[in-house]
Image (cartoon, grey):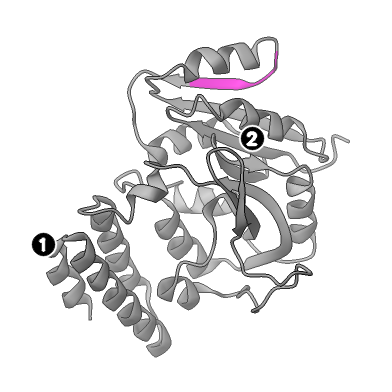
Amino acid sequence: MNQLPLVSVVCLCHNQERFVQESIKSVWSQSYPNIELIVVDDGSSDGSKELIHSILDGKNVKFISLETTLGNCQAFNLGFRESRGEYIIDLAADDILMPERVLCGINTFMKSDAGVSFCDVLNIDENGKELGTHFKRDKKGTLFCQVPEGDIYANLIKKYFISPPSMMIKREVLEELNGYDESLSYEDFDFWIRSSRNWKYAFTNEVLVKKRKVAGSLSDQQFRRKSTHQKSTLRVCQKIKKLNRTREERSALRIRCLYEIRQCLRQRNFKLIPGFLRLL
């Protein structure tokens, strides 16, 4: 059993008292046996810290309790540096891993040379009501379209198509990137770009995670009026320009910038538009 690769799950909590117990228990319910859980509370002001303490009482689980809110990027990096796993899962405390999630992820890595694997997710609301899968499927569960995998750097520039909680990451990828960029307000787009430049992605055609749609969450705030996340998006696009090598990749950046300019207009982030225009 100890010969199986160790998987570290870093569970990040910020004011998610309603959901954190279910999230933690989903890690303990995995069919895969060799898992390390690290819980990071990012300065919660509700009852999350007290609840986590009670859930973890008597358990061999690392708990990092932060007095102030550092944000997802920095909080995750603290948890990652405490981890020992060969593979890493970044789990928000309002999301849920289905029992076969880790086992299926390991199987995907064993069959590929990918640095990152991802799967389909089932979106749920705050009460657990099912809202449909991330990737569109017919009544039999068959995908309508082929999901890109392999070298998907240009695909990721053009379009967000991976659900963030679906990812499982080789440790060496995060080490090469020095974790998440702590200067940014959100992590996923930047991680996708920097990791896919040098690493392949593999898709597991299974619904293995439940992603909770919560009003006011980080992902919800990203598309609200005058969202502060667009400033981080501009910085990622500036990184893309430096990383690009081919005409196809430069064309992909143009598509991305035009999309972000439209988002700036909708969200009234007019001051950011010149930055995107310069990248065209």
Q: In which quarter of the image is the N terminus?
A: top right
Q: Earlier in the sequence, mark 2 or mark 1?
A: 2
Q: Residue 73 is drawn in which quadrant?
A: top left
Give the residue displayed 42% in from the left and 87% down from the top.
Answer: 248
Seen from the viewer's position, the closer of residues 248 and 244 is 248
Q: Quadrant of the C terminus?
A: bottom left
Which residue type does callout 1 highlight? Lys
Where is residue 246 shown, x and y percent of the image?
41, 86
Q: Badge 2, how many Cα within 10 Å: few under 14, some, many 20+?
A: few
Verify whether residue 75 appears in magenta: no
Eye-nearest disc, 2 or 1: 1
Report the residue marked by disc 1: 271
Which residue is painted at 42% across and 76% down in the image? 158
- What segment is highlighted magenta in the picture? 59-64
Tags 2 and 1 touching, CB below 8 Å: no
Q: How crowded is mark 1: few (under 14 residues within 10 Å), some or many (20 or more)?
A: few
Q: Position of residue 124 (x, y in %)?
A: 58, 47
Q: Furthest residue to the right?
A: 1
How far from the left and from the top, in percent, is residue 210?
63, 47
Q: In which quarter of the image is residue 233?
A: bottom left
Residue 23, placed above or below residue 280: above
- The relative height of residue 170 versus residue 236 in the rendered view (above or below) is above
Q: Is mark 1 on a helix, strand or loop?
A: helix
Residue 217 shows in the view:
yes
Labelled disc at residue 84: 2
Q: Residue at x 31, y 74 (%)?
A: 259
Q: In this view, does 75 lie above or below 260?
A: above
The structure residue drawn at horizontal position 75% and vertical position 72%, both measured from the top left corner, is 142
